[in-house]
Image (cartoon, grey):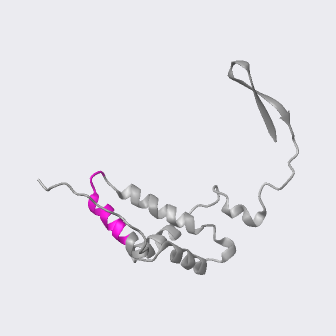
Amino acid sequence: MIYLSKKEEEKWVVARLVSNHNHELAYPYSQKFLWTKRKKSEAQKNLIDLLDNSGVRPSKIASVLVTQAEVENLNLTGRDIQNYLTTKIQKNLEKGDVQLMLKYFQKRQFESPGFFYAIQMDKAT
C-alpha cells in the first residue's frame, strides 16, 4: 500500500510504503469476473444477438448462457450482456436515425411496462 502526500509546488511524495500485501489479489474462482477476463467469445456474441433479435430479454439471455456453458466456465454477468446490447445499439445508431431509436423505445416498453418515453416531433416539411 502506498500513502502519498502533496508537497509544495504541486509535487507528490511517497509518505509511507507498505510492501507486503495482506490479502490475496483475487481468489482463483472469482478471477474470471475481473474485467480483464470478461471477454465474450464470438459464439457467445452470436447467441446473444440471435436471442435479442428474437425478443428475449437480457435476464433470460443470461439464463440461456448458463445452460449452454458449465457454470464455472461462464465469465459473463447479466450486466455484461446488457452493456453489450446497449453498446451494439449505440454503434448501429447513425445520426438522424430516429426510426431505430423509436423501435428501441417500443421494445423497452414491451419488455418493461414501467418504461416510459415521450416524443415531440417537428412538423413535416
Magenta residues, dominant SS class: helix
Residue placed most toward the observer, 67 or 5: 5
Nearer to me, 115 or 25? 115
Where does residue 96 sit, x and y in percent of width and height?
A: 27, 53
Instruction: Tell which of 25 and 73 is nearer to you.
Output: 25
**Given the current orientation, which residue lies at the most extreme top position?**
9
Q: Is residue 124 above or below residue 59?
A: above
User: x, y percentage for residue 111?
Assistant: 42, 75
Question: Where's residue 26, x and y in %?
Answer: 77, 58
Judge whether residue 98 is colored magenta: yes
Q: Quadrant of the N terminus?
A: top right
Horizontal side of 117 relative to 43 (left or right) equals left
Q: Is residue 104 magenta?
A: yes
* Residue visible at 51% across and 75% down in the picture: 61
Residue range (magenta): 95-107
69 left or right of 107 in image: right
Furthest residue toward left: 125
Kindly identify the residue that appears in the image at 32 percent across and 62 percent down: 118
